[in-house]
Image (tube, helix red, strand yellow):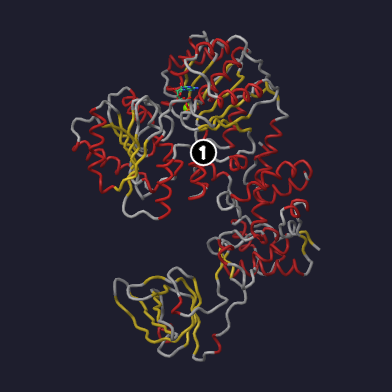
Amino acid sequence: MFNASSTDLTQLKGVGPRVAEKLSRLNIHCVEDILFHFPFRYEDRTRIIPIGKLRVGDHAVIQGTVELSEIKFGRRRMLLTQVSDGTGMISLRFFHFNAQQKAALTRGVKIQCYGEVRKGARQLEMIHPEYKYSTEHEQLADVEEMLTPIYPTTEGLHQLTLRQLSEQALILLKDNKLKLNELLPTEILEKNKLPELIPSIEYIHRPPPDAPVYDLQEHKHIMQERFAIEELLAHTSSLRLLRNKNRDQAAHALNNSTQLEPDMLDSLPFELTAAQQRVIKEVKHDLQQAVPMQRLVQGDVGSGKTMIAVFAALQAVESGYQVAIMAPTEILAEQHYKNMLVWFERLNINLAWLTGKLKTRPRREALAAIADHDAQVIVGTHALFQEEVLFAKLGLVVIDEQHRFGVHQRLALREKGKQQGFYPHQLIMTATPIPRTLAMTVYADLDVSIIDELPPGRKPVETVVIPDSRRDEIVQRVVKASEQGRQIYWVCSLIEESEVLQCQAAEDTANLLAEALPDVRIGLVHGRLKPEQKDQVMSHFKQHELDLIVATTVIEVGVDVPNASLMIIENAERFGLAQLHQLRGRVGRGSQESACVLMYHGNLSQNARSRLAVMRETNDGFVISQKDLELRGAGEVLGTKQTGEMQMIIADIFKHQHLLPIVNRWTDTLIAEHPQQTQLLIQRWVGDKQQFASV
Ligand code: ADP
Ligand code: MG
């Protein structure tokens, strides 16, 4: 008996160097990999479907008689074949065909086809179906006994090859010639009533004819869910191991602040919310430990995350350490700097400012201040972590708007902050709230705090959903708002992914509005502007030298213009809810009533209608992200960047949301009680793709 993970592919028939090379492109290196290369969909060729019962979109086997075959000369030359079976008629279209084919498909011939059913001009059709034909009916009668698995493949590697390889591997498995290790502990299998490894593998590769195709297609069959759990556990445990490893590292323990903090509390013009107090307490506790804090603070736009950073900074400063506060863009860094100045100057704390934009002299001065500890708190962009920046005594790093950061970047940054074997504490703040179970899964390497409360007196942004046919009314609203001295955002988007077209659309809108509204000062921000140019337009807007900003979605992240009170979003139906929420969060920051107009185009689907209704009904980011997850998918909630990092084979944090509680519940048990299996699971599912644990 061979171990499947060490059995070379060349043991299988049909694998020579060329095929092996192609398989390696699919990350298939051994026989075990073949068994874990799962079909991504299935075709049902087990039954013949009467033509009269076909629906558009079905993939189906049909069988009938050719009624007519003719070559048509339209825009493209094609062979058009009509087939009927007594229940209905369907056309087959072939754009590529030869004389032999044409000759074979004549009237009276029996034909069996497999293909996708589409809506043709006059009747249903199949384009380039697979087919076999015969002059005798019986020969066609046999259909497949099982659902046909379709595997992800690569150029030059045929489905049939993959099917034959999995067939051989399955036979070896059945004949007990191959050993495949069950890596899920019995306890997890039993408590969650999960099927065993080998039957699940067999089922997924060769589901029986009565298998529920829909569940299989959706990767929601229990046999698949078993592996989804395996894979998710591999990811969470690799992250959790990373966290545990972090706990073996050294950091400077920072004492509680006894002077600065009370002074600050005295001078605050408001009471901290209960949620802020709770999170500050959690952070203060972490900072007192001699291991580096790795804490993520999730809080909706406007929940007062800055205060958390401020109180953490006070503790570091009073303990004699420096604090680096990093924002994703120049303008956000500047905004932070100005806010921080207000809080820190009265406590005689020295602030410095460092971004890539800084001119030579101020830059040199800033670097000197950082190096000789003249600067106690340093605010900036990622320029803070360039080589020539030498901190005198870095104790705490605050990263704001974390949703642009992934686990690798977090780690790299922490490495850069390392001094004489001591790591800085890390406080990460994100305004993209996600449901707790999801946070536990994707942020398993972090401790998570949640600010689930907004400061009192905040007025919710009134949200309306309006078809773009009523654009004129909306333009009138803009006029009124600007006459009242309010400022306005107008966000454009297009179906096209193309950046160029997006920018074009924004430009067109800006021009049209400028024509219609000669008294309104209009600025334009889009992705093709250089960061400096973007920042410049935004700061004009901030200083109220502009009344209206037309933008693509580049304005998404935390720019604070309290006087802006009207947000208009075109084609709102195309955005994810989380993104709409972020955009809407740009208004409602001042004392006046704010509004958000969600414009949509054409007829809304049921799903789009529900999603926009959610926006109208609530301003709570956590509720919105939960709904977004239900209605759209995890990619939308997290942003592609983060989901892109958790690249998974069978699991999908959206489709398998219902499994996350199981995964979260078992992660710690797995690594504590089954360390060896954990390592093997990580190897099996995470592999070299993410070297989390080795960073
Ligand atoms: P965000 O979580 O979006 O970063 P900020 O920290 O920028 O939010 O806070 C938003 C606004 O609310 C700021 O003007 C801040 O001064 C104010 N703020 C913060 N905490 C409180 C509070 N407890 N009570 C009243 N206002 C607060
Ligand atoms: Mg903020």
Task: In this rendered view, identify the residue nearer to me: 434 or 428.
Answer: 434
Task: In this rendered view, identify the residue nearer to me: 568 or 27.
Answer: 568
Identify the residue shown where x is 76% and y is 56%: 181
Residue 380 % position (x, y):
48, 23
As shown in the figure, which amino acid type bears the numbered disc 1?
Phe
Residue 519 located left or right of residue 119 = left
Q: SS at mark 1?
A: helix
Residue 400 % position (x, y):
51, 28
Task: In this rendered view, identify the residue nearer to me: 386 or 460.
Answer: 460
Vertical placement of 293 versus 182: above or below? Answer: above
Can residue 51 be seen in this snapshot?
yes
Identify the residue shown where x is 25% and y is 42%: 508
Quadrant where the C terminus is found in the figure: top right
Identify the residue shown where x is 62% and y is 69%: 211
Quadrant where the N terminus is found in the figure: bottom right
Can residue 390 be seen in this snapshot?
no
Q: Which residue is mark 1?
A: 622
Which residue is farthest right?
1
Residue 543 % position (x, y):
32, 22
